[in-house]
Image (cartoon, grey):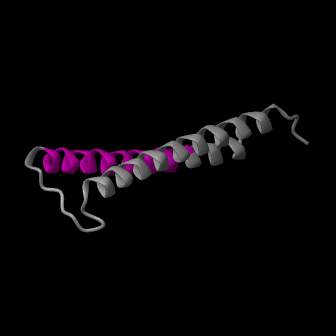
Amino acid sequence: MEQIRELATLLESGIEDYDDQMKILQSERLKYLRLSMTNGFGTEEGDSKESWLLHLKQLEDSLGVRLQALKQAIQKSADSLKEPEA
């Protein structure tokens, strides 16, 4: 039963973290769209269109890694639950 509780806690915090990061990504996408519509990109590193695209890609990649980690945690927990208890 302890393993199930640990998994539930892990999933709850992982899902909350994923949701928070998804909100950030959505917010950053909206900023990018606004800049695109107003041609408000700068020319300096960090505020250019290319920098914004890289930033968005990194956020998307981070979400992918988080999702994969959650899936692996679930799989490992499921595998450990299949093992007979001592």
Residue depicted at 91% across the width and 42% down the height: 86
Instruction: Name the dominant secondary structure of the magenta segment.
Output: helix
31 over 48 or under it: above or below: above
Give 44 or 28, whichever is nearer the viewer.
44
Residue found at the far right of this picture: 86
Give 46 or 7, whichever is nearer the viewer.
46
Q: Can residue 24 be found in the magenta stretch?
A: yes
Left or right side of 39 for 12: right
Give 75 or 54, whichever is nearer the viewer.
54
**Location of residue 76 (image quadrant):** top right
Magenta stretch in the rendered image: 11-36
At which x and y percent is residue 78?
72, 34
Q: What is the tally of numbered marks visible in this picture?
A: 0
At which x and y percent is residue 65?
55, 46
Q: Can residue 52 be found in the magenta stretch?
A: no
Residue depicted at 66% across the width and 43% down the height: 73
Residue found at the far bottom of this picture: 44
Residue depicted at 18% across the width and 62% down the height: 42
